[in-house]
Amino acid sequence: MFTGIIEEIGIVKTVKLGTGSSYITVMAKKVPEDMKVGDSINTNGVCLTVTSFGNDHFTLDVMPETIRRTNLSALKIGSTVNLERALRLMDRLGGHIVSGHIDGTGKIDRRWEEENAVWFNILADAKLLRYIVEKGSVALDGISLTVASVDLYSFRVSIIPHTKDVTSLMDKKSGEVLNIECDIMAKYIEKLNFPGSNKSTIDMDFLAKNNFL
């Protein structure tokens, strides 16, 4: 489990992304400090397993399913990636509960500045937007963010100066794809209330009546 609080921006040193076995090697300074083979590293929002490492780098396996579901297929040598080590029980939960299991991807529709903040409008499929609520939590490329608003086709987030400085989000331009992990609570609530069904009647009134808002 992770929190969506990015520890470091890594740089891709080696990338081999194919239809079969794939891997990436990432250069970093902080994250490898207490690393072990088998550790889970949240890489652009994707929970990946360390297969080897050195003082300033580590290698991660990438499954075909991960390539299909995420934006990792677009990585190349020199790409930047957001990194976070797994949550320890004694750590503060500064963001929200993030599993590193990507639900899908969204595309940056536009971005603009408002004083010290930067806004992003993200286009996403309805199957993802059903789990995204205003003032709820969402992870974009592994970054824990608060949803400012949501409509039938997109949602908006506002980026504070600290997030601009310590993540790769400001490198992203309109048209680029971001990994999306919806709040896991929404998915479990739907499953428990509507087992075996792909249709949900959960809306803001339902959540309010059941003390989720």
Image: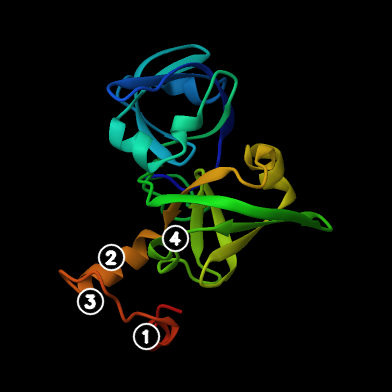
In the picture as drawn, the residue positioned furthest to the top comes out as: 54
Rendered image quadrant of residue 114: bottom right
Q: Earlier in the sequence, mark 2 or mark 1?
A: 2
Residue at the disc numbered 2:
188
| Disc 3, SS | helix
Q: Are marks 3 and 2 in contact (CB under 8 Å)?
A: no
Q: Are marks 3 and 1 in contact (CB under 8 Å)?
A: no
Nearer to us: label 1 or label 4? 4
Q: Earlier in the sequence, mark 3 or mark 2?
A: 2
**Which quadrant of the rendered structure holds the N terminus?**
top left
Query: Can the viewer see residue 36?
Result: no
Residue at the disc numbered 1:
206
Residue at the disc numbered 4:
125
In this rendering, would 134 be left or right of 113?
Answer: left
What amino acid is at disc 4? Answer: Asp
Q: Position of residue 74 (x, y in %)?
A: 50, 31
| Towards the viewer: 148 or 151 | 151
Q: Position of residue 64 (x, y in %)?
A: 30, 31
Query: Can the viewer see residue 103?
Result: yes
How many numbered markers are drawn?
4
Crowd tier of the residue under label 4, counting other residues whose Cα lies within 10 Å: few below 14, some 14–19, many 20 or above: some
What amino acid is at disc 2? Answer: Tyr
Crowd tier of the residue under label 1, counting other residues whose Cα lies within 10 Å: few below 14, some 14–19, many 20 or above: few
| Disc 4, SS | loop
Structural distance between the alpha carbons of marks 2 and 1: 15 Å
Nearer to us: label 4 or label 3? 4
Q: Position of residue 8 (x, y in %)?
A: 58, 31
Crowd tier of the residue under label 2, counting other residues whose Cα lies within 10 Å: few below 14, some 14–19, many 20 or above: few
| Disc 2, SS | helix
Q: Are marks 2 and 4 in contact (CB under 8 Å)?
A: no
